[in-house]
């Protein structure tokens, strides 16, 4: 029979001071088992000091296409970058 | 994963635009990600290849698990258990990657069990002696690495990412195998003979792992165009032979091919003809262990059914209880439990 354990997304903090990063996904019946499985699957060689598991269907994604117009508003605002500004040579600490 | 409804632009894009965007992304060495549009044939090719790869990892646990109880020392036993566990992990990374293409894990396992999807033919050979654990690590995992390193640059993102993890771990597999063979080769006369025998049996099947010669490989050209595959079967096979020859010398073992010799002109080794009839017979299911491998896989799956069911039932019961009495207090308990697990994961 098919049990269809839900899919979980796994995030691993590789060491203190760094944020959790998506490592992959796995199936597990509940959160506790998802954590245990994630430990066995993604941290067999000390790759992590902390794990988050999130039900995959709890993730809301921005769009079906990663080049979506959703992100366009940021594309035409180069003045948000420090390199946009011209500063005379010799000016320090700026 | 919940996705927003398609944007206006998405709905307005015709098939030709979508195809062009895909082709441009592949040509520009960008990665294709799960929710991107992709040609049906590209998706089908990836599902077939990743599923076959995942199946190979978990079927590949069997010939090695065969020797866990008979490992000659605690050190070797611990290493072998870790390796077999890695193979399970590799299978799981790959099943996850396949699932991003819209197939379910159960569907893939059902197809494996029904013989409708393949696994690597190499695992249909028996592991007759302890030295086979060395030969598999050195040659079979070595061939796998040669095949898989270019897959880390595969055009499909999730597959490429899985391969990066796998390749890092395969290196341990290959080195432990080499070290094991070296210990035998430098041991007693009988141990040396055992090592040589294992290499004799695994050499040719390892060369077959690269698949049929280029002019007979049905999927190669298209896969190379899609940048799923980066090098031809024959090129990778040649690379593997060139790598293995000096490694065999350092082991003090020979490779069972009278035609194997350095070709000064080509700057590579010439080697003898591969028995493709044997390869075809194994693909057809007539190898020494086809029946045994798939029977054991089915049995493991069936005998594990109660565990999967019990875990699902427990989760459902807990979820129902939690839903019935959701108080602030309960939430705090839950929170603390999460932290306890966090601590465990650290150990």
Image: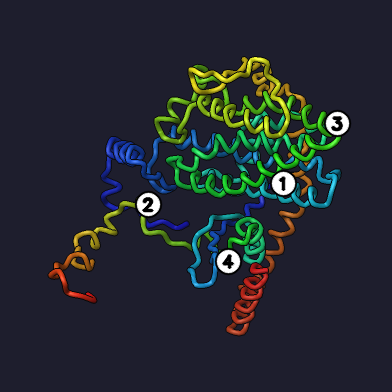
In this rendering, the count of numbered labels is 4
SS for callout 1: helix
The image's mark for residue A64 is: 2
SS for callout 4: strand
Q: On the same chain: label 4 and label 1? A: no
Residue named by callout 1: B84
Please tell me how crowded label 3 is: few (under 14), some (14-19), or many (20+) other residues with Cα within 10 Å.
few
Q: Residue at x 74, y 38 (%)?
A: B182
Viewer-nearest residue: A65 or B277: B277
Q: CA distance from mark 3 to mark 1?
A: 29 Å
Residue named by callout 3: B189
Residue named by callout 4: A51
Q: Quadrant of the C terminus of chain B?
A: bottom right
* Residues tagged 4 and 1 counted as in contact (Cβ below 8 A): no
Q: Position of residue B123 (x, y in %)?
A: 70, 32
Q: CA distance from mark 2 to mark 4?
A: 27 Å
């Amino acid at each position: 029979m098919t049990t269809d354990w839900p899919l979980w997304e796994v995030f691993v903090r590789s060491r203190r001071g760094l944020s959790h990063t998506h490592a992959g996904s796995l199936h597990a019946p509940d959160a506790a088992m998802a954590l245990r499985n994630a430990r066995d699957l993604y941290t067999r060689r000390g790759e992590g000091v902390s794990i988050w598991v999130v039900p995959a269907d709890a993730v809301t994604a921005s769009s079906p296409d990663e080049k979506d117009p959703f992100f366009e508003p940021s594309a035409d605002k180069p003045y948000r970058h420090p390199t946009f500004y011209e500063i005379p040579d010799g000016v320090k600490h700026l | 994963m919940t996705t927003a409804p398609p944007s206006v632009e998405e709905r307005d894009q015709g098939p030709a635009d979508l195809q062009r965007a895909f082709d441009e992304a592949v040509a520009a060495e960008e990665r294709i990600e799960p929710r991107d549009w992709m040609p049906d044939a590209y998706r089908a090719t990836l599902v077939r290849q990743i599923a076959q790869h995942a199946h190979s990892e978990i079927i590949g646990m069997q010939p090695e698990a065969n020797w866990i109880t008979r490992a000659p020392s605690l050190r070797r036993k611990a290493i072998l258990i870790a390796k077999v566990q890695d193979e399970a992990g590799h299978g799981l990374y790959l099943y996850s990657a396949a699932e991003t293409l819209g197939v379910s894990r159960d569907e893939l396992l059902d197809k494996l069990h029904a013989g409708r999807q393949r696994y690597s033919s190499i695992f249909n050979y028996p592991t007759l002696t302890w030295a086979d654990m060395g030969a598999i690590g050195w040659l079979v995992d070595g061939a796998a690495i040669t095949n898989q390193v270019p897959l880390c640059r595969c055009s499909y993102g999730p597959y490429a990412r899985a391969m990066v993890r796998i390749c890092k771990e395969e290196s341990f597999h290959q080195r432990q195998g080499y070290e094991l063979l070296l210990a035998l080769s430098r041991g007693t006369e009988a141990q040396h003979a055992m090592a040589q025998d294992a290499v004799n049996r695994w050499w040719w099947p390892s060369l077959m792992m690269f698949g049929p010669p280029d002019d007979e490989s049905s999927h190669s050209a298209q896969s190379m165009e899609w940048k799923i595959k980066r090098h031809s079967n024959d090129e990778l096979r040649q690379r593997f032979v060139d790598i293995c020859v000096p490694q065999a010398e350092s082991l003090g073992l020979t490779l069972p091919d009278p035609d194997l010799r350095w070709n000064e002109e080509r700057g590579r080794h010439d080697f003898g003809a591969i028995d493709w009839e044997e390869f075809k017979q194994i693909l057809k299911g007539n190898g020494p262990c086809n029946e045994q491998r798939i029977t054991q896989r089915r049995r493991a799956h069936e005998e594990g059914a109660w565990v999967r069911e019990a875990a699902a039932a427990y989760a459902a019961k807990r979820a129902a209880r939690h839903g019935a009495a959701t108080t602030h207090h309960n939430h705090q308990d839950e929170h603390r439990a999460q932290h306890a697990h966090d601590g465990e994961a650290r150990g």
